[in-house]
Structures are given as structure tokens and as C-alpha cells.
Image (cartoon, coloured by chain):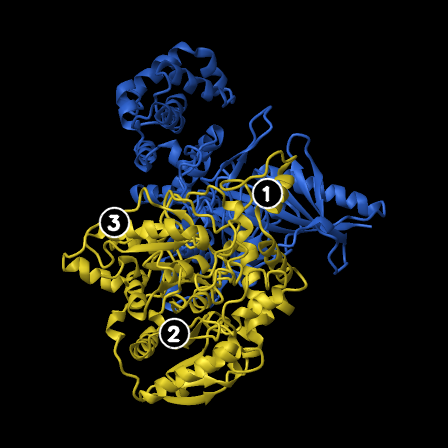
Chain colours: A yellow, B blue
Amino acid sequence: MENLYSLTAHELRELIDKKSLEPSRILDEIFKRIELLDDKIKAFVLVNKLNAKAETKIGKLFGIPVLIKDNICVKDENTTCASKILEGFKPPYDATVIKKLKLEGAVLIGKANMDEFAFGSSCETSFYGPTKNPWDLERIPGGSSGGSAAAVAADETILALGSDTGGSIRQPASLCGVVGLKPTYGRVSRYGLIAFASSLDQIGPIAKDVKDAALLLNVIAGHDEMDSTSVDLPVPDYRKSLVKDVKGLRIGVPKEYFVKGIDKDVEEAIKKAINILKDLGAKTIDISLPHTEYALSTYYIVAPAEASSNLARFDGVQYGFRAKDAKDLIDMYVQTRSQGFGNEAKRRILLGTYCLSSGYYDAYYLKAQKVRTKIKEDFDNAFGSLCDCIITPTSPTPAFKIGERIEEPLSMYLSDIYTIPANLAGLPAMSVPCGFSKNNLPIGMQILAKPFAEETIFRTAYTFEQVTDFHKKKPKL
Amino acid sequence: MKYETVIGLEVHLQLATQTKVFCGCSTKFGQRPNSQTCPVCLGFPGSLPVLNEEAFYFSIKVALALNCQIQNLIKFDRKNYYYPDLPKNFQISQYDMPLSYNGVVYIAPQGSGERKRVRVKRVHLEEDAGKLVHPERENYSLVDFNRSGVPLLEIVTEPDIASTEEAYDYLVRLKSILKYLKVSDCDMEKGSLRCDANISVRPIGEEALGTKVELKNMNTFKGVRLALEYETKRQIGLAQEGEKIIQETRLWDSEKQITTSMRSKEEAQDYRYFPEPDLVPFVVDNAVIEKIKNSLPELPEAKANRFISEFGLSEYDAGVLTSQIDIADYFEECVKLYPNPKTVANWVTGDIMAQLNARNITMDELDVLPSSLTEILKMIESGVISGKMAKELLLESIETKSRPEDIVKKKDLFQISDTAKLEKMAKAVLKREKKSVRDYKSGKTNALAFLVGQIMRQTKGKANPAIVNEILKKELEG
């Protein structure tokens, strides 16, 4: 029999349901695996070996290990956003998604490394140091949910939660060869997710295959009266969308996503993947999303602006890190924040503060919001009559080397060029494994749909997965 | 050169909702520090605000009562600044789209006899901050977040107020309206009503506004009055000396009775307002506004007009009676039980209000049932007691918290109106007081008062003076 850690959640659930597997065995194996590998990969910032247990024996995820990104609040457990400034912070409450996981019997095995406050695309900005890509330990796993994606890829967990503000679930999923879904803005409650950019953030699943992603989304999705931006719409059973059928599906292929800067291997893999879907009866339509070129700059105004305000609360007054020996109140603020935040966090706080300042607001923030509307309209037009889903690369390149881009913020920011528009428009988008580069690094395909059309994405991705085996390949560790 | 004052007022009102504006914590005053908090009002990472419907309805109520227009789209903004009593280091407020605007409050300062419009520029909803506590002789401060997240309504006027008297009258009238609406206890001492002012001076006839100064820290109505008086004099003084008035924020020092500079315009903060992404803007249903409008109580002005037309009261009495909702309600209750509005009005505006003022308490605290007053009035009318006895009876009833009827019975205070008995006493007095009788007959009519007094003394004031008067006259002239 295969090792339990290498199975999917739905496979394990089947074994548990047939009573042929005691869930504690999964945990034993998983913790052994973490012990064996995580010194190398460093996907975990906290391994919850002592307290890990299911709170209920009934539930859709009973006995299934789930790794939680470190920016999601788990009651009485360290939740630090991989930042020094939240050193020792133990939230007094569970995030809504955590409540839901506990109710369904999931086992929370620990907290995942990430870019500090989710600021980054490589996991290198973490206060705890970088996570490594299981496919090549000299490379980054992507970010910011790099710990979550790397752990799933390395079989250190069965499922993981990530958060996605500009591609933070999809890009690491792509670079680590796993499935990652950013749900529609409002589909999953943000209550208890430590905010980066409130109008863009969304929690979502990272999993070994499409079916597991559906299983996990089923559990975490839904309206929450604690989150005014969560939408009060019924949640379909996403497993029902797992149908191998794309006949007549209209796939939009935006020309703006296949231009200079894209890696040859990536471009090839995506084109092959689209052809596979065509062979199964889907139609492709060349579309244009003319405002795509403004997405990155729009994002780097809106997101830091919101972040600068969201992160203002980390001042050393109530919780987390407080600088010692401050002379007075202002000095306490200055010292705490100077010592507590890393460089990228400081960079974004400065950017955002600048964009919101009197005299600059109209030129930056207001203008960016207008462009954001335009970007959304591009998608409205495309989904309005032309296509059912859009397929693009998730990332312009496979995983890059650790240290390669960390000194050049702009080249780092370009890693998210394909994923950012979905956040600006609030759309659901998934990355699914669709190939490998010549040097054996995973490549992901991004599937986008209109708001609350996750079902279309699941159907498309599931169909693709049924005829390919990219998702089954494992890194040699 | 003669100068005039231009004032605009900014009132912050804590709404008396059950729970805070963005979470479910209680708003109760005076509880143990930090006992009424949760992750939301503590601004903990990951927490999110959800608007309290009651706070929103209260705000709309106030807006409608102040004749404001209601914004079609309700949206909140973040006001960013660092202070330890502000747990998120931003305040959820409303910036470019206050929930209502363009209102008006009518004032009529005493003595001017004129009704004047004060335009309300905006009314917006925001969250209150916590409170810093500075222990004496310690080098640290403590924060109490019980107040953090209490709904706060900001009511801002245009610079339509031309004097300290007008400012005071505006505050009194605004408070009266707010109390009618039962949306706040409006207690300045508890901080549930706070007032800041913008004040400038300009030569009479000049249209352009002078340089304004913002006044803060006026913690009582009296403080507002004194601070504005002081600041008016200070600014006119400077202007007359040809000195420049600096645009700044000044604090009222109630001990020294002066204002002192807190910060200049150059030091003013940039609040970096932007729309609050955690709260979704929403459209207000007209039907909801109509419903709130229809549920508004009769407001002071309308009530005063009705008292004039329905009860035939003077404008002055109607104004006094309707200045406070509990007094107006008390008056109306009394009139129901004793349908003689003018008499009731005299007693309420006279003896009752004198008691309120003397004791510095509210109508509720006075604890005199409307029926107690009307019983007394009925006893006067039927001649059971005299007017003078009635006043004492009222006082005793207030002090002993007993029903007037019981006091009358217990102390045998019934007025003596028995003519036969009084005639007998009159005859005896006339026999005894021969000198006074002679005086009266020789034209000194004030001797009569002396004779009446004798009988009153003999009866310990219980004789009906009118009847005694009549009997004595008849005897003397007969």
C-alpha cells in the first residue's frame, strides 16, 4: 500500500468511511514526514504535534490534516503573519474558516510559513526565513502562501489553507505543482484573516487535486454575519461540478497574457493544455482584456494603500512585539515598527501612506479605483457574451532561484502579473498543474470564471485532470 | 472699528444604542475597565466591523429631526491617525459622504425675540475611541476600551451663529430635540454630548470670514459659554491692536478660565481618508426613511405651537414647558387629570420648575406624580386648602414622597369654610379689637387686613381668607 501521506483527502476519507483506516495513523505518518522533511523545506512555522486532534468524529473532513497559513487566526495558537511584530501573538478567537474546519472534524496540524504579512511572491520576506521549493530546494516555492503550497507538494500535509490578495494562492500552487483556488471575493468569510488588502483578500484551498479543492471549499465557503463583505448566496456542492465534460465550453484566451516576458516552456505548456481541452470538445475564443497592462500598477496602489491602514494597528500597545526602552509614546511607535517590520512591509506601508496622502489621493488612489473598474469591465464584457471561462498561465515563469529577485522589487512584483487581475475584479480563479519545464519545474494553468462561477472552473479543471497526470507527479525528496 | 463674531459648532453625540456601532458589546457607562470589549472593538488583527442597524436608525432619526437630507448611498471611510486610545489606529467615520446634510435648527435666543436659522452642514456616524487613564505619579498610562466603538454622531453647523448667546441657545435647543428623540442621554458630564467650536471675528459689514480658531475641551454648557466669551474678547482684542490671528486649535482651561494654544494649522494631521473596504456601501430604502419619519415624535417647536393653539398658553409658557420633553409630558398628563391648562402651566413653570432648579434635578428624579399636583389644584378649587397652603403642601409632598391627600388628612389641614363657625369667631374678634373697628369705621380700611389676620392666626391659617374677609366686612358695615 502507498504511504498514507501521499494520498488525497478524498482517498483518505474513503478509507476512513470504510473503517479500514484509523485516522490517528494519518497523523502519525504526517508528523513523521514533517520531522523528516521540514528542516529542509521549512514550510511550517509551527507544528502542532501535541494538540492536533479532531474536535468531532463526524464531519466532512474528520481525521484529515490541514495546514493553516500563519495569517489566519487560530484561537490560543501563535498567529504571526511570519512577522516579528506579531511575536507571541495568540488570538483570543478562531477565524470563521477555522471554526468551520473544526466543526467538520479537520485536524489542524500547524501554521504555514508565508511572506511577511503576505507581502511577496517567494516566501523570502518571512521573519522565519524562506521556504524551499520541494521540486528544487534552491528555488522559491512562490508566495505568499509558499509554506502551504510547498507542504502540500511535499506531502507534509493533506490539505492547506492559503490566502490570495494578488495571486498568493495560485502562484505558489503553480510553482509547487499543486491545485490552488482563489474563490470569488465574498465567497469565503475573511473574519479572522489578518488583513493585507481588505478589498482583495480571499481565503482559499490548496490541495493535491481538484476534487480535494472542492471538498475543502465546500467546508469553508458561505455567508458569515461577522463579515459584511461576505455574500449571502447559497453554496452549491462543488463535488457535483466534478464532471468530465467540457463539450461546448467556450474558453477565452486573452492575447494580452501571451506577450513578451513569458517563459517559452510556460507558453508551450499552456497552449498544449488548451489544445487538450479543445480535443475534449471545448472551443477557444481569442479575446482581448485591453486594460490588463494597467493591472499591476493599479494593484500596487490599491493594495499598499489598504495595507498601510490595516497594519497601523501593530504599534506595540496591545499585543505582539513592543520595542524596549522607548523614551515616550512616539518613540515606542517608531522603535516598535522600525524593529518589528521587515523591509518589504516597510516598503509597502510607505507606498500606501504616500498614495493616500493629501494632495496625492486623487492622482493615485482614486485614479487606481477608476482603472480597477475598467479592468472589471473587461472581464464583464468577456464573460457577458464571449466565453464561459478564461485560461492563462498562472505565472510567467516557473520557480526562480532563492535570492534572484529579492533585491529587485519590480521583477518580484512581475511574478503576479497574471494573477492580479482576478483580485482586482473579484473573480474566482484556480491554478492547476499543466506541465513541467525542461528542468523539471512545475507549470500551472490559470482558469478564471465570472463571479460565483466556481463550478465552471471545477468542471474545466477536473476534466483536464482526468486526462493528464501532471498532478500525480511528486518531487523527489 | 466694530467687530462681530462668527461661530460654527461641532457636537459629538453618543447614541444610546444597546450595543456598539460595529460589534455586539454593551455600551453601558461606568463599568469595570475593558469589561465590555471583544476582538472587534479592541481592533484585534483579523476582526471586521459590522454596522449596528439601531445606530443607523438613530442617526437617521436625528438627521430627519434636524431637517437634513439623507444621502442615497451610505458609505464609511477610514480616518487614519495614531493614538493609543484608538486600537486600530484608524477611526471608522464618514468623510465626503456624510449620511445626511443640509439641515436646519431654529433658534430664538432670550431677549432677542427673533427666530433665526442655524444651518446644519452635516450629520455623520462614526465610532468613539477608548479612554486613556493616567495614574498619578506613575510613568505609564492605561487604556480603557469600554468606550471604543460606542456610536458617535457628529453634528456640524455652518458658521451661522453670531454670538455666545446664540451658540448657547443652539445647544439648548439641539439637546432638547435630541432628548425628545430619546437617542442619547445628552449628558455632557459623562461625555455623551461633547461640543467643539470654530470661532472667528470680522469687522461689521465685512463679508469674508476671519481666520478661524478651533476650540476644544469645553466640557459643560457653561464652559462653552465662557470659552466663547473669552475667545471673542481675545480675538477682537488682537484685531483691534492690528495683530494677526493665527489659525490653530485652542483648549479651554476651565480652571484658569482662558484658552491656550494646542497646535497650529501647520501641525494639523493628514488623516489620509479613504473608503472603508470592510463595510459595503448600501442604498437606503426610501420606505425605511418614510417609516422612520412617521415614527418621529412631536418635536419641541410643533409641541409649543400646539400648546398655544390647543391650551391657549402664552408663547413664553409654551416655550418653557416644551423645552424639555419630560416637563412637556408631565404638563400634558396633568391637564388630562385637571383640564385647566393655564393653572397647570402656572404651577409647572412656577413651583415645579423652581424645585427642579433648586435641587438641580430632572423631572424624572423629582418623582412627583401628575396626580399629586392635580389633587392639590382640585383641593384649591374646592376650597379645601388655600393657595398658600397648597404651595407648602406641594413642597412637603416632594420631600416626604407622600400623596398630598394623605398629608392633608394626617395633619388636618382642611380649610375652614364653615360660615357659621367663622361668623362666631368674627364677632368675638370685633368685640375684642375695638380700636381696629374704630379705625376701620373712620376710613382706615387697612384695619380690615389686621382683623382677618387675627382669625387666620387663631385658626393656624386654615380659615378660608375670602370668606373671613366677606364676613368681617358685612359685620363692620352692617
- Residue A160 sits in quarter: bottom left
Whether B401 is drawn above or below B210: the answer is: above
Residue A54 numbered tag: 3
Going by the numbered disc 3, the residue's amino acid type is: Ala
Q: Could you say whether the residue bearing mark 2 is in a helix, strand or loop? A: loop
Q: Position of residue B165 (x, y in %)?
A: 63, 45
Query: Which chain letter matches label 1?
Result: A
For residue B53, above or below residue B429: below
Disc nearest the viewer among 2 and 3? 3
> Left or right: B199 with respect to A187?
right
Mark 1 surroundings within 10 Å by alpha-carbon count, few (fewer than 14), some (14 through 19), many (20 or more): many
Total numbered labels placed on residues in the image: 3
Residue B137 screen position, x and y as percent: 60, 23
Out of B26 and A10, give the one closest to the viewer: A10
Task: Judge if badges 2 and 3 mark residues of a common chain.
Answer: yes
Instruction: Report x, y in % for residue B69.
Output: 50, 64
Q: Report helix, strand or loop for mark 3.
A: loop
Q: Amino acid at mark 2?
A: Pro
Q: Is residue B360 left or right of residue A36?
A: right
As drawn, the label of residue A451 is: 2
Disc 1 or 3, which lies upstream in sequence?
3
Q: Nearer the viewer, mark 1 or mark 3?
A: 3
Residue with the mark numbered 1: A336
Instruction: Estimate the spatial distance between the alpha carbons at disc 2 and disc 3, rounded to whole Å.
Output: 33 Å
Name the one closer to the observer, B388 or B113: B113
Asked whether disc 1 touches disc 3, contact meaning CB atoms under 8 Å apart, the reply is no
Q: Amino acid at mark 1?
A: Thr
Q: Secondary structure at mark 1?
A: helix
**Which quadrant does the C terminus of chain A fall into?**
bottom left
- Specify which label sits upstream in the sequence, 1 or 2: 1
